[in-house]
Image (cartoon, grey):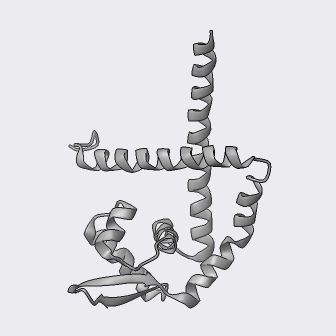
Amino acid sequence: MPNEARERLIKQVVADSRRHYAAYTLFNQALADHLGLHPTDLQCLSLLSLEEEPLTTGEIAKLTGLTSGSATRLVDRLDRAGLVVRRGDPADRRKTLVSLAPKPVSEVDDAWDTPGEAFLSALDDFTDEQLAVIGDYLRRVSAVGTEQASRLASAPGTGDS
């Protein structure tokens, strides 16, 4: 019997995870629309904000799952919009480093204020131990998602004709 209960719990967690992903995708689209950005551009800005150092376009491509050409076009859009700054890599003149532009990105940060508070309040009732488990789960499923995206990108697709 305990295995049946665990199976039900796992099935529920998987279903809840899929619902969470769908809801977050819709939220990301709505926030991007609100800001006049493409959802991928918004995610790139979010990922850049998590990095301590500027990134190359190749690193941005890896983080976003884009091809190098698509990542270059993404950085071009963000640069034209004044959301990122490009500068030469002092260690390698062939590379360009990309970082967030301070002023316009504050507008993106401001748009996050209300949703950010709402997301944080969803964590209010969890203990520190539960938050550690949630964090561990998110890191694990993020790694699995990245791994599976890479696998799917390199495998022949069913839509190929």
Horizontally, residue 64 falls left or right of residue 29, namely: left
Give residue 120's quadrant in the image.
bottom right
Horizontally, residue 57 falls left or right of residue 23, namely: left
Residue 107 in the image: above or below residue 152: below
- Please tell me which residue lies in front, 41 or 142: 142
* Image x and y of residue 21, in percent: 56, 48
Q: Quadrant of the N terminus?
A: top right
Q: Quadrant of the C terminus?
A: top left
Residue plotted at (63% across, 77% down): 109
Residue plotted at (56% across, 83% down): 105
**Residue found at the far front of this picture:** 129
* Image x and y of residue 50, in percent: 51, 70
* Image x and y of residue 114, in percent: 74, 69
Residue 55 in the image: above or below residue 133: below
Residue plotted at (29% across, 45% down): 151
Residue 87 in the image: above or below residue 64: below
Residue plotted at (58% across, 90% down): 103
* Image x and y of residue 23, in percent: 62, 50
Count of numbered marks: 0
Horizontally, residue 41 falls left or right of residue 34, namely: left
- Please tell me which residue lies in front, 127 or 27: 127
**Residue found at the far right of this picture:** 125
